[in-house]
Image: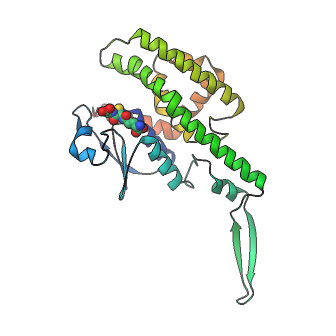
Amino acid sequence: MMKVHGNAFTVETMRVMAVLSEKDLEFEFIPINMEAGEHKEEHFLVLNPFGLVPVLEDGELKLFESRAITRYIAYKYADKCTTLVYEGKPMARLSAQMEVKVDQETMESKMQWELMPDSAADAAVIENTMAMVNMWIEVEAHHFDPVASKLQWELMFKPMFGMAADAAVVNENGAKLAKVLDVYEARLNQSKYLGCDIFTLADLHQLPALSNLMGTPAKTLFDARPKVSAWVADIMARPAWVKVLALRNQHRSRGSR
Ligand SMILES: N[C@@H](CCC(=O)N[C@@H](CS)C(=O)NCC(=O)O)C(=O)O
């Protein structure tokens, strides 16, 4: 069984849990006590020399970087449950044409599925869609996540630890987030989800930070944009995500932070 070493309160660990939940895969969760600095201890540094959670262990494979882990799982289990990635094969399979071949020597007939797109035009649509999904995956990592992280720290974690938010940092990053959300609003006017018309990793990667920010004053930035707020409501209601939040709450009630 796969093992996830992490902390259920970190967005990166929740991102990995989200993909496992969408794929309905069982995994063993190994909580890392970050307050005690366990992620900087020798036994953890063997798994991730940068001393950061999460880490996925799948047999011999040890992977860190949450988005590399989600991609690994999404591709390895591409055919299981929600697709999450947009690649040539599943689309091609949809347009598969069945061919019956008769072996002249044995007179045996064989049915064969052609795993080819119907036409060059179909192939181009697949390639372009894959490129768009990958672009929006990068947008989350480089435009959304840095400002979302600063806002979560100021508006969620600092108050949790009894510290006051820094108004200047909140204002600066609120303005930056507003710009990112304007881009999302325009994109969601053209496409049902960020990457394409189906839910993919480009949407899933945002869930942990989105869920956190929805419990802070930054929620108003999402609510002010109709397409963005409908998208947030849609993806946060996914049963797989609701399961991840329940799992996190179980850890909270066990006091394992
Ligand atoms: N890019 C990494 C970031 C991992 C990361 O920053 N994890 C945080 C979670 S709070 C961590 O382990 N922080 C501990 C530290 O900075 O020492 C990923 O996506 O997995």
- Out of 82 and 133, give the one closest to the viewer: 133
Q: Residue at x 58, y 18 (%)?
A: 223
Q: How many marks?
A: 0
Horizontally, residue 221 falls left or right of residue 44, namely: right
Q: Quadrant of the C terminus?
A: top left
Residue 134 lies, in percent from the top left, at 58, 42
Q: According to the image, what is the colour scheme of the structure?
A: rainbow
- Out of 246 and 144, give the one closest to the viewer: 144
The correct choice, above or below, for 97 with respect to 166 in the image is below
Horizontally, residue 233 falls left or right of residue 162, namely: right
Q: Residue at x 73, y 58 (%)?
A: 117
Residue 121 lies, in percent from the top left, at 78, 51
Residue 44 lies, in percent from the top left, at 26, 44
Which residue is situated farthest in the top direction here?
167
The answer to whether residue 122 shows anywhere in this view is yes
The answer to whether residue 24 shows anywhere in this view is no
